Image: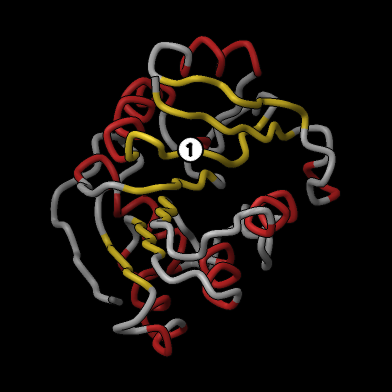
Amino acid sequence: MSDLKCSKDKAPSQLDATFWDNLWQNKITGWDLNAVSPPLQLYFDSMTCKNKSILIPGCGNAYEAIFLLENGFKNVTVIDIAPTLVQQLLSKLAKYAGKELTIICGDFFKHTGQYDFIIEQTFFCALDRNLRTAYAIKMKELLKETGKLAGLLFDKEFKDGPPFGGSKTEYEQLFNEHFNIQQMDVCMSSVKPRLGAELFFELTKK
């Protein structure tokens, strides 16, 4: 199922749809790796059931979704708040329309659904720090009882944001109330510019 559901509601942040859409319109996308993130590719390669439902919030150019779809995964949903980007995705990923992919333009915090996996890749760091607790609560809400939240978090601070950084200790304190931390370790397979500055994590619901 590939469709466009544009929400007119403003995101609960000063970093709203207009902010992000302006970046995409002006091609200011310094976070873009132009490929699937290597640690996530390794994680996807370890996933044996390709019918599991997967959500990728703040999907950007959706390299992770493309990798999943090209490797036989059947139930992928991506969501982003920038209409310009989403229109590009609808064109770029048209061959998956009506099949394995749902594309949503809207506010993650208003999204509903239940997923086996939610993949984190530069979405958390794009949110204002005051939304981090809301992020954890929403992720728990969207996961099935046996679901997993997995992906990458920056293990460094930035002078200005976005991106907004953090540390393992900070993330553990944030997630411990709602999740069991299965792993949260320095990632050794990051792309070179991020090597030593990313944590790979996997959480399950408490």
User: In x, y percent, where is residue 51?
Assistant: 43, 64
In this rendering, the count of numbered labels is 1
Identify the residue shown where x is 39% and y is 87%: 94
Residue with the most extreme front position: 49
Q: Position of residue 183 (x, y in %)?
A: 65, 26
As helix, strand or loop, the secondary structure at mark 1 comes to strand
Q: Residue at x 16, y 57 (%)?
A: 7
The image quarter containing residue 34 is bottom right
| Nearer to the camera, 145 or 174 | 145
> Residue shown at 43%/23% (left/top)?
129
Q: Amino acid at mark 1?
A: Leu
Q: How is the image coloured?
A: secondary structure
Q: Taking 63 as reference, is 52 left or right?
A: left
Say which residue label 1 marks. 149
Tell me the quarter of the picture where residue 93 sits.
bottom left
56 horizontally vs 49: left or right: left
Residue that appears at 54% across and 75% down? 72
Side of 98 where 110 appears, left or right: left
Q: Quadrant of the C terminus?
A: top left
Note whether 106 is above or below 199 in the view shown: below
Check disc 1: other Cα within 10 Å, few if <14, some if 14-19, many if 20+.
Answer: many
Q: Quadrant of the N terminus?
A: bottom left
